[in-house]
Each structure stands twice: as C-alpha cells, then as structure tokens.
Image (cartoon, rainbow, N blue to C red):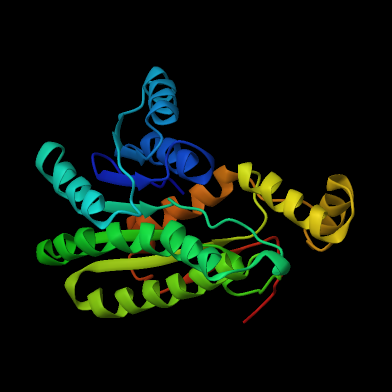
Amino acid sequence: MDVRLDQRIALVSGASKGIGLSCARVFAQAGARVVAVARDAKRLDEAVRDLVAQGLAVQGMTADLSDASQAQALAARVEAEVGPIDVLVNSAGAARRYAPADLSAAAFHQGMDAKYFSTIHLLEPVVRAMAARGRGAVVNIIGQGGRAASPMHIPGGSANAALMLATVGYAKACAGQGVRVNGINPGMTRTDRVEEGLSVSAKASGRSRDQVLADELARIPMGRMGEPDEVAQVALFLASDWASYVSGAIVPMDGCTASVI
C-alpha cells in the first residue's frame, strides 16, 4: 500500500523531537510539504536542517502553543505564507510526571496547559479553516495514559482523557464539513519522555531505573516499547485518503497492554 500526501500542506506540532519529528519526516517522505513547529528554536532549526539535507520539503516555524495568541498567529501565518493547511498533526506538549505525594493544583494546571491547551489552541483555528474549505484531516497524538490510569501520571492522564473527548467531539461536529479528526494513543514509546517517567517511578518506589524499566517491559505483551516511526506511520495512514471513511477513532498503540474494547 503506497500511502501518499503529494503536495499537501501538513502542519506538524512538537516536531523538533520524538514522535512529532518522526511525523514530520514520514509525512515529507510521503510527498507532503511539511511545516514543522516547536517552541525550542535551536532544537527545531537543527531538526529542520537535518530533514532538508535529506531532500525533504520541510520548513520550521517557532511558537509556544500553550499561548492561544501564538497558536492563532501561527495558523494564520501558515495559511498566508505556505497555503491552506490540508493536514494537522498535533504532537506538541508533554505533561510532567508526578508521584502522588507531589501532586498539587499547579501540577494539574501544568498538565492541562502543556498537553490539552497546546493541542486545542492550534486545533480550533485550523479546523475552522478546514471546515470552511470543506476538507482536511487532523491527527492528535494523545497518549494511552488517558485511558489506563497510572498513579505517576494523573495530571497528564487527565489531560489525555480530555483530549480524547475533544477529538471525538470535533470529529462528530465536523463530519458533515469534510473534516476528519482522529487520535492515536501511544503507550511506552522510545522518546525522552521514557527516561522522565522511569526516574519518577524509581524515586517513588525506591527501585533502580533498570528495575522499573524491566517491570514496565514485562507488562507489555509484545515485549518491547514502541518506536516513534511506528506511531508516525499510523498517523500518515489516518491523514491519507486510505482512511477517508475513518473519523472519531482513537487508535491504541501500546503493544496490547491495555487490551480495552
């Protein structure tokens, strides 16, 4: 199956590292014109230079999407300077992990600002423009922590659960206007976030980082963590015409850990 997005404009947030960077690369390899967005200008510039050196059509734009005004300005800038956005991949923002003893109201605000609002602030203006044109596809990279609760990820899991509802809600609201909205729930995936989670769990449990990792992997029926490119390939399918009748879906990618219906 040859999944292509030739000449479509794809806006990918959180594109300086991890799953977002993999999405930027995989989408560009599929022929998309990618606008890669992140708030860390230095890291984003390095990532974009590397992708361009591979002959890929990628350009970078810096924005802090937890700020609604910056997100709206970014969406308007892309439409004005690059063209109508055909595909939006939301992969920006990461809620910190907290042991239960360290939870506070501030922790929940951090989780919502970093993950939920960094997605919603960009989703809203982009979906509105897509609906006005009668076409578009959105893929929200969310997280299985919104479906399978973890004591070490309560604020972030709460933000993820809210994003699942928003994803399905927007899908239903925009279904008659040619806009599809889907989500992906990665489980343990080989990114910088893994080390953060291992450190928090190790501190809370008194075990070593390696012991925590071994226990986490033992709970995954497939016996390994996922790779960012694996998530990006599913995102590519959901954004493509091969998924033209798929909207309002939340795809789990956790190695069959949760096994929920």
- The part of the image, by quadrant, that contains residue 32 is top left
Front one among 30 and 106 = 106
Q: Is residue 40 above or below residue 1?
A: above
Residue 249 location (% of width, % of height):
45, 72
Residue at horizontal 43%, vertical 50%?
92
Residue 81 location (% of width, % of height):
12, 37
Residue at horizontal 72%, vertical 68%?
101
The total of numbered circles placed on residues is 0
Q: Is residue 16 above or below residue 88?
A: above
Front one among 147 and 153 = 153
Front one among 205 and 31 = 205
Is residue 193 toward the left or the right of residue 16 in the image? right
Please indicate, yes or no, whether residue 103 appears anywhere in the rendered image: yes
- The part of the image, by quadrant, that contains residue 120 is bottom left
Location of the C terminus (image quadrant):
bottom right
Front one among 41 and 49 = 41
Residue 212 location (% of width, % of height):
84, 54
Please indicate, yes or no, whether residue 85 appears anywhere in the rendered image: no
Q: Is residue 5 above or below residue 117?
A: above
Is residue 142 toward the left or the right of residue 55 in the image? right
Residue at horizontal 29%, vertical 52%?
87
Q: Residue furthest top?
A: 53
Residue 218 location (% of width, % of height):
86, 59
Is residue 49 toward the left or the right of residue 229 in the image? left
Residue at horizontal 67%, vertical 48%?
196
